[in-house]
């Protein structure tokens, strides 16, 4: 299955992936409408320190601890991707306790969110990857 | 191969998925005394609170799950004994189910201690199952006029309190222990959570117990009195081991299993809250009665029942919970050097021993807590990471560049 992979050597720390993620999942028609004057809470996050930076988002593990820990069945594996049904989620945070990558977080409204590879939004393929100017994140089979 | 699974919760689902990962064809029969499809039992407090609905609660797995997984489910029926010589399970309706591999995922039952006058209390329930939650809701009615007494300030009692906050006129909680969540949290974080719950109007009677009930009134050991209309008993649970005993399996406080989830009887496996397993750190038997462990133990059992040879050795105590908006995540044990960070509304304790993070507690800010959980679970040597960095905030930056490349660019996860 194709996943988002990160090569920190190429990461510029520009945070564009975060903006593209927030836009892709905003349901808005343009980046300006989605981002201007908004505090964004993207599903991909840059870690940076000194001269190192890299993006972190869901690894879509083949053996996902978040799915096994979920008490409501909100998290499931669909065609290899770990997806979340927010309607079923009660916000118990068991997934946050379980994920070794820290890849699940609360959105603006306190609901658990995670990268779903843009499978549910209009883009269909990860917009963060398309927005990365230096190919530090790629979407491919490995 | 004929598989029989007794039980209908996390370990049973894990087992089905474990079996089917290895064996697509074997015949799986599930026996569950509850009449419902699979559901997350910890969701019952959220149901009463209105954070989920009964339909959503019962949709832990999709509607066509059993058909898709090839499971023949017998629901609303109890198993009464296991004949491990003849390899059959006897059901209460007289049927005998033959098996080649059996999983006991029988969970636990509420433990109700002897209390004087308990039989005079008309409106009383435990808080373990959907039926318990439905009967509690019926007892509370629509008037928000019922005074509730909860005996037990553990996770179950307190989640119950949270769930019925807006349905009850008042809530009193009694516990023998000097603090709330006595088996989950040490004194200081327990006190923080207690204040949070008290702010919502719940009254605690700690270091105390019910000496005697009379209709509508509980006399406490301390001499106090608590008038009430509805009683919820959340004192504790006992592993359901009767079937295992009938089969001749070794039983201590739970069904004894090895790291392959095998009981002492050939062909019989067990998983979830009904089991005890050896703690690799202490060598003693312990129960890890939490949802994720039940799910993973069940899966390991299922795979092994179908012919694989896998160990479940990554079980650690851990809890994700929250009360009235205050999130809490804890894992491991609270031993060794205690590194404490406190702010007005957060609490963070990291416990370091023998070059390892052995436990942690986070209240308030729980962002990326799983990075800490992984350090505990994987027994990561702290000398291999930048501990000062990760101590401040859970982050992957604290790992070496090689390790990061593996985590974020590795093909097999």
Image (cartoon, rainbow, N blue to C red):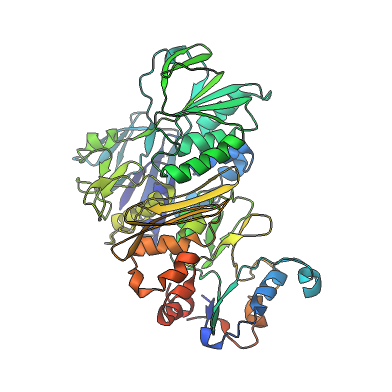
> Residue A125, percent across and down?
64, 75
> Residue B342, percent across and down?
51, 54
Q: Residue at x 59, y 51 (%)?
A: A89
In the displayed structure, does residue B351 sit left or right of residue B149? left
Quadrant of the rendered image containing residue B259: bottom left
User: Foreground residue, B389 or B236?
Assistant: B389
Quadrant of the rendered image containing residue B141: top right
In the displayed structure, does residue B111 sit left or right of residue B362? left
> Residue B377, percent across and down?
36, 61
- Residue A14 seen in the current view: yes
User: Foreground residue, B165 or B26?
Assistant: B165
Quadrant of the rendered image containing residue B134: top right
Rendered view: A84 above or below A36? above
Q: Residue at x 61, y 67 (%)?
A: A43
- Residue B39 seen in the current view: no
User: Foreground residue, B370 or B385?
Assistant: B385
> Residue B217, percent across and down?
51, 14
Q: Residue at x 23, y 35 (%)?
A: B245
User: Foreground residue, B65 or A32?
Assistant: A32
Rendered view: A21 above or below B29? below
For the image, the number of numbered tags is 0
């Amino acid at each position: 299955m194709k996943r988002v992979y990160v090569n920190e050597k190429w990461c510029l720390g520009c945070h564009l992936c975060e903006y593209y993620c927030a836009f892709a999942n905003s349901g808005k028609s343009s980046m300006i409408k989605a981002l201007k004057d908004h505090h964004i809470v993207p599903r991909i996050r840059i870690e940076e320190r000194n001269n190192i930076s890299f993006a972190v988002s869901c690894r879509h593990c083949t053996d996902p601890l978040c799915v096994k820990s979920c008490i409501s069945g909100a998290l499931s594996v669909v065609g290899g991707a770990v997806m979340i049904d927010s309607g079923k989620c009660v916000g118990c945070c068991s997934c946050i306790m379980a994920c070794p990558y820290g890849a699940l977080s609360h959105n603006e409204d306190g609901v658990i969110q995670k990268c779903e590879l843009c499978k549910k939004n209009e883009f269909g393929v990860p917009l963060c990857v398309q927005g990365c100017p230096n190919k530090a994140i790629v979407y491919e089979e490995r | 191969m004929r598989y029989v699974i007794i039980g209908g919760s996390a370990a049973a689902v894990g087992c089905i998925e474990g079996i089917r990962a290895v064996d697509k064809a074997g015949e799986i029969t599930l026996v569950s005394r509850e009449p419902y499809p699979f559901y997350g039992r910890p969701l019952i407090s959220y149901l009463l609170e209105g954070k989920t609905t009964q339909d959503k609660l019962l949709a832990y797995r999709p509607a066509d799950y059993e058909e898709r997984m090839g499971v023949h489910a017998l629901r609303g029926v109890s198993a009464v004994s296991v004949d491990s010589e003849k390899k059959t399970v006897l059901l209460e309706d007289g049927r005998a189910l033959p098996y080649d591999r059996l999983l006991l995922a029988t969970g636990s039952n509420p433990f109700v201690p002897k209390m004087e006058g308990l039989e005079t209390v008309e409106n009383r329930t435990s808080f373990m199952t959907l039926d318990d939650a439905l009967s509690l809701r019926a007892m509370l009615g629509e008037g928000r006029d019922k005074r509730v007494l909860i005996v037990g300030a553990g996770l179950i009692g307190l989640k119950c309190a949270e769930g019925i906050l807006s349905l009850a006129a008042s809530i009193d909680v009694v516990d023998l222990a000097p603090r709330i969540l006595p088996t989950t949290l040490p004194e200081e974080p327990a006190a923080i959570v207690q204040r949070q719950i008290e702010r919502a109007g719940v009254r605690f009677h700690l270091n105390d117990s019910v000496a005697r009930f009379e209709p509508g009134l509980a006399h406490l050991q301390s001499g106090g009195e608590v008038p009430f209309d509805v009683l919820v008993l959340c004192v504790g649970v006992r592993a359901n081991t009767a079937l295992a005993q009938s089969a001749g399996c070794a039983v201590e406080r739970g069904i004894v299993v090895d790291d392959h989830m095998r009981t002492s009887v050939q062909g019989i496996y067990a998983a979830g809250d009904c089991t005890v397993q050896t703690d690799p750190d202490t060598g003693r038997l312990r129960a890890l009665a939490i949802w994720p462990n039940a799910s993973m133990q069940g899966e390991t059992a299922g795979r092994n029942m179908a012919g694989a040879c896998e160990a479940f050795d990554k079980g650690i105590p851990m809890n994700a919970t929250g009360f009235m908006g205050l999130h809490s995540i804890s894992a491991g044990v609270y031993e060794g050097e205690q590194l404490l960070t406190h702010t007005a509304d957060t609490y963070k304790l990291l416990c370091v021993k023998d070059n390892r993070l052995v436990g942690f507690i986070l209240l308030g800010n729980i962002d990326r807590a799983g990075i800490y959980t992984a350090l505990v679970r994987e027994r990561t040597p702290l000398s291999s990471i930048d501990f000062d960095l990760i101590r401040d905030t859970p982050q992957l930056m604290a790992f070496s560049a090689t390790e990061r490349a593996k985590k974020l660019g590795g093909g097999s996860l």
